[in-house]
Image (cartoon, helix red, strand yellow):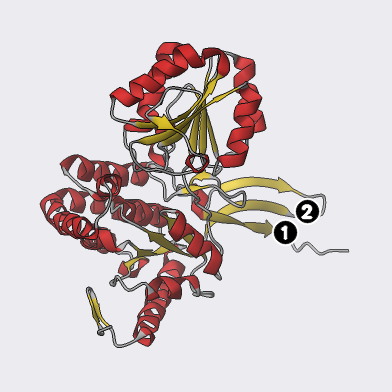
Amino acid sequence: MNGRREGLRVKDTGDIAGLMAGIGARAKAAAAELAFAPAAARRAALEAAADAVAAAEATIIAANAEDLAYGRDKGLSPAMMDRLRLDAGRVAAIVAGLRAVAAQNDPVGEVIAEWDMPSGLHIRRVRTPLGVVGVIYESRPNVTADAGALCLKSGNAVILRGGSESFHSSRAIHACLVAGLRAAGLPEEAIQLVPTRDRAAVAEMLRATGTIDVIVPRGGKGLVGLVQAEARVPVFAHLEGICHVYVDKAADPEKARRVVMNAKTRRTGICGAAECLLVHRDVAATLGQQIVDDLMAAGVEVRAEGLAGTRPAEPEDFGHEFLDMIIAARVVDDIDAAIAHIRRYGSSHTEAILTEDDAAAERFFARLDSAILMRNASTQFADGGEFGMGAEIGIATGKMHARGPVGAEQLTSFKYLVEGQGTIRP
């Protein structure tokens, strides 16, 4: 292996360690300043960053063309190439996301609860930043903007380590975020992008106890598994998006056909795409088969059990994240069988029930514990922007601290502010 890698000249992993130590130290110093920076300054930085992205559209798309060429040479799947691709519409969406986060209420210092004690103490529980957030992500360059914006809004410094595929796009977007910080008079080190594709940088982030307060992995099973196995700092779990759609016997046919088609085909490469269709036995031969026929007509490969699909399903097709124009389908005896299937094969991300039966919907919601449960709505809505968060840094599927879309509020902790009047404890 030669010592030259794109974005950084390194002699050995000791240079990477030194690079990451420096990034971490600067992030920690920036976090301390951001913790008391005025909310107006953070908002101004995001608005200026949005202006910079809009002005740099041509530059960003040109940088993305380099990444797309790299992705083609690497043999990325069509779905992964779609994740990577930026065009004028997607750059405009990045701008809109930055503005939406800027306009949100500022979470830092928000009083969550307050009360008085018989002892005379007045106690407030208030939101406070986590500190330094490390975000490790793969091919989606818009994560650079989403993560940077949400961390800044919540008063956190962030270290961004994008995927090798999005290297040039992420750098172009990051430059706009830095321009926003500069315009608002905030430390430019508040949002740092690791300037190398070397994977040793990821290992250094996972070991950065004392510098990084939480790691957020955003990517496939391999990345998330590595982070969870090797991180020595807390991790916001984000597992695969093995999303299920259950068509109940009381489903409205028109709604069901429309929702399933959108859930699978709108964008197959995102974590909210449906990967498994479950159909109640009473409607399998009618509505269920009609939905399968719709999917196949749209070019989806349906691996089916109990339905006439493209080909019979294999056991390994269930519990699999395809991220492609492929879906597993199965007939189930009733809603409880659907729930049992999801408990066995799901990843606790997002599940949907299509039904007009209130009792069935309540049972589905009560007996499943995925981070997001939907009724008569596409799983493609499993996104922070669609939840009113402006953007999200990932979908947390664990049960500690944050679940579902992780927005600015979820990137805060809290502290207690206690006031007395010379109050002493007897």
Rendering coords of residue 279 (x, y %): 52, 22
Q: Is residue 381 visible?
A: no
Drawn side of residue 114 relative to residue 118, left or right: left
| Quarter location, residue 368 | top right
Of the 4 image quadrants, the one containing the C terminus is bottom right
**Element under disc 1:** loop
**Does 239 appear above or below 214?**
above
Sequence-wise, the earlier of marks 1 and 2 is: 2
Image point (26%, 60%), residue name: 165
Which residue occupies the extreme right position in the image?
A: 426
Q: Residue at x 22, y 48 (%)?
A: 85
The residue carrying pointer 1 sits among few (fewer than 14), some (14 to 19) or many (20 or more) residues within 10 Å by Cα, namely few
Q: Residue at image x 33%, y 25%?
A: 296
Q: CA distance from mark 1 to mark 2?
A: 6 Å
Which SS class for mark 2? loop
Say whether residue 360 is visible.
Answer: yes
Residue that carries the numbered disc 1 in the rendered image? 420
Location of the N terminus (image quadrant): bottom left
Q: Position of residue 392 (x, y in %)?
A: 41, 46
Q: Which residue is mark 2?
A: 120
Instruction: From the viewer's side, name the closer residue of 73 and 232.
Output: 73
Label 1–label 2 contact, CB within 8 A: yes
Amino acid marked by disc 2: Gly
